[in-house]
Amino acid sequence: MPYLSTRDRRQPPERVLFDAVLRDGLAHDGGLYLPAEWPVLSAADLTALRGKSYAEIALRVTTPFLDGIVAPAQWEKMIADSYAGFDDPEIAPLKALGDGFWLEELFHGPTLAFKDYALQLVGKLFEYVLEQRRARVTIIGATSGDTGSAAIAGCSGAELVDIFMLYPKGRISEVQRRQMTTVAAANVHAIAVDGNFDDCQDLVKAMFADLPFRRDLNLSAVNSINWARIMAQIVYYVAAAVALGAPERKLGFAVPTGNFGNVFACHVARRMGVPISEIVIATNRNDILTRFFETGRMSMGAVEASLSPSMDIQVASNFERFYFELKRGDAGAVAEGVAAFRKTGTLPVTEAEWREACNAFTAARVDDDGTLAEIKATHAATGIVLDPHSAIAVAAAKAKRRDPDLPMVAL
Ligand SMILES: *Cc1c(COP(=O)(O)O)cnc(C)c1O
């Protein structure tokens, strides 16, 4: 399964293998990597996954993406090790909310952030690939809490990885500050920056833009632009679908969204053949995506703090992967579109492309009051206490579900 960059306009474009995709994170032309084609999960494949464990489903779903880089028995062991420490044997259990609504719980990993589901596996992949290549990497990232804690938990102690996480001093939760700063492993470096998340992000971008520095230290990224993370996230969509009756029965998902990574993983599951009837993009007041689906215009606004800080994002980097699809794989058009977005704050999208996007997704905005109201309503009805990000997904699911006869899963 070779990969292409969304911005590689050469004809034919370079075909990159999985280990380079993993190591680089971002393509050298600034684009994001995508598999050249989607592996297929047929109805028979889905049926065969019924009753299987999360690890078994992960093995089936992810293996076609690996280019044979990892030997099958080794990969099976890495998957088993990645999820062995999770505190629920189902790994991503489904909880009924009533009336056909479900909650897929993604907080059973070591740092409680859903990012553990991918980063546990990605940490192990890094170690394996680097050992094979006898190479070292330096992982650099900016975090408002979740990514940093989960990335550190995934990479601490890896001999060929140094990891540096920049976080805004005084602006992350105390639990996550401790998760990052009390790790004794010598390869882990958590750095408090006097500034906000964007200041951290700017420092990281500047390091990646310094090409000699990037090369000398083998800089690598583990934010959701890294394809390997998206790949690992496809698994829980397949697991939920199979548990709720796929391939015979369709289902919908509502996904709390920041960088569009998790939504894109859901879209990939659908592309692979999972019968997903609808995908609801759930945003908070930072609603660039929701405004796009409402109006056809993708224009940047200022980031405002909300009760769901992991979704306080205006530029949803992973949207570029879907944009590449809208542009029918025309990397030149993607590169120009993204450059225009940076310059003018608006992404060029034609009317036909917008309609196609609206067929693929719906979107809903839930503000802080709506978030609190949903936490209260779900608690009253079920006794479950939702975190604010999940509450946004549940509220969006309820607002947008098209077919009340199909199950709708909020993440
Ligand atoms: C990272 C994160 C998100 C946003 O996910 P994306 O893949 O960036 O869209 C939403 N909620 C929580 C709790 C997160 O940690």
Image (spheres, rainbow, N blue to C red):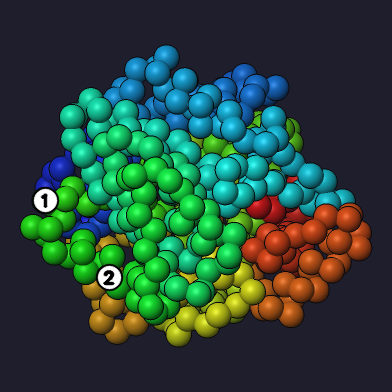
Q: Mark 1 points at which residue?
A: 216
Does 57 sit above or below residue 272? Answer: above
Q: Is mark 1 within 8 Å of ligand 1?
A: no
Identify the element where label 1 is drawn. helix
Q: What residue type is labelled 2?
A: Leu
Q: Residue 203 carries which label?
A: 2
Quarter of the view holding residue 369: bottom right
Residue sitting at x 64%, y 48%: 107
Residue 120 horizontal side relative to residue 278, left or right: left
Residue 217 horizontal side relative to residue 121, left or right: left
Residue sitting at x 48%, y 81%: 303
Q: Determine if residue 99 is in view.
A: no
Q: Nearer the viewer, residue 287 or 149?
A: 149
Query: Badge 2, how many Cα within 10 Å: few under 14, some, many 20+?
Result: some
Q: Which amino acid does label 1 sit on?
A: Asp
Residue 171 in picture, x, y percent from top left:
51, 74
Query: Badge 1, how many Cα within 10 Å: few under 14, some, many 20+?
Result: few
Q: Which of marks 2 and 1 is nearer the N terminus?
A: 2
Q: Nearer the viewer, residue 386 or 98?
A: 386
Give yes or no for contact between labels 2 and 1 (Cβ–Cβ under 8 Å).
no
